[in-house]
Image (spheres, helix red, strand yellow):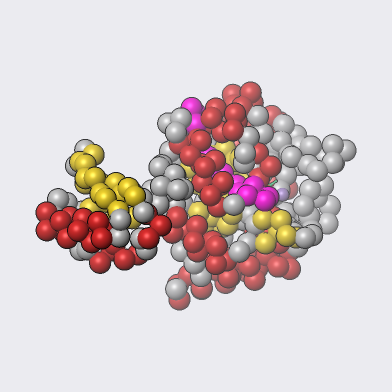
Amino acid sequence: MIVIFRNIDEQDIDSMTKWLNKQGVSMQIFDNDGTIIGKLYGNIKAIDSRFLYEWKSVINVISTECNHALAGNSKGKRTVTVGNVTFGQEFVMIAGPCTIEQEQDLLTVARAVADSGAKVLRGGAYKPRTSPYSYQGLGSEGLAMLERAGKECGLMTVSEIPDAQLLSQFDHIDILQVGARNMQNYYLLKQLGKCNKPILLKRGLSSTVDEWLYSAEYIMSEGNCNVILCDRGIRMGDRCVVDIAQLYNSLEMTCLPIIVDPSHACGNSNLVLPLSRAVASLAIDGLMIEVNADCQKTLCDGVQSLSITQYQQLVTQVDTIRRVI
Ligand code: PEP
Ligand code: MN
């Protein structure tokens, strides 16, 4: 366990040391570039970390059992800026089709979501499909369409990168998405840690928050700290579920911005609006919503995609909730 102090307050440190010693714990103090840190040794299990905040100079108590040195919350919240958008500072709407299929539909959606205040256009060009016989995406051609639509509508762009070898194809895409299925592809994460683009890291289908943060740690420890987390629910039976209580906890556990993707969590467009309303009441940093010009015809995730009208309704309701909160 580590205790971070606001400053060297001899009286506080003395009285805490005495109290800790009585519990069978010793504390070693060191100054890490101006940050005063107390490292606790011994019978740590006897300590309820919440109690340590009774000492007024304590800023933070960190459990070292869970060692998210960079992605953890010990240094306060981080922001991630992409062009004119700052995650962690403003509520960011990301919207667009699951997959890029044809340019005209993409443009129709891009114009509509930009008019409703979205800042980022999503669209998959490389699609991780359960069946190898399902539509796999347009690849580099799709990325070029996304770039053009983003430029035309003044939107930043995000698309999933499944393999670091494709990095050069993503030169003109603003945010690189790591899909749920790749959250623990550590070799991909390390490569993305060496590039200078923001990474949207989705939570794995069966991952704990601890594992999710370790994946962020893989990217950050290679030097790229521009990571945005995206909770897209975890698998429970036939559906995925966003655990709202745990989401609240995740927001407390990390310094990184967290957005929610209710489309993949719900798997059904009827549920996207109510789930968006529910999570918008927490201090999340944005939403990512699948929107399609023609949900019936699309080759990928049409059942969970919203029409443009449904999306506009969602934005109005989420805005209202956020104003109340
Ligand atoms: C997607 O965003 O289209 C996608 C496939 O998401 P996930 O990786 O969360 O399933
Ligand atoms: Mn999808």
In-front residue for pair 1/185: 1
* Residue 324 in picture, x, y percent from top left: 45, 76
Dominant secondary structure (helix, strand or loop) of the stretch shown in magenta: loop
* Residue 193 appears anywhere in the view: yes
Q: Which segment did they paint magenta?
A: 193-207
* Residue 262 in picture, x, y percent from top left: 64, 60
* Residue 256 in picture, x, y percent from top left: 44, 49
Q: Is residue 127 within the magenta segment?
A: no
Vertical position of residue 57 compared to residue 126: above or below? below
Q: Is residue 195 within the magenta segment?
A: yes
Instruction: Name the residue furthest bottom.
Output: 324
Q: Is 252 on the left or on the right of 233, as rendered?
A: left
* Residue 235 in picture, x, y percent from top left: 71, 56
Q: Is 229 on the left or on the right of 294, as rendered?
A: left
Residue drawn at point x = 59 percent, y = 24 percent: 168
Q: How many marks?
A: 0
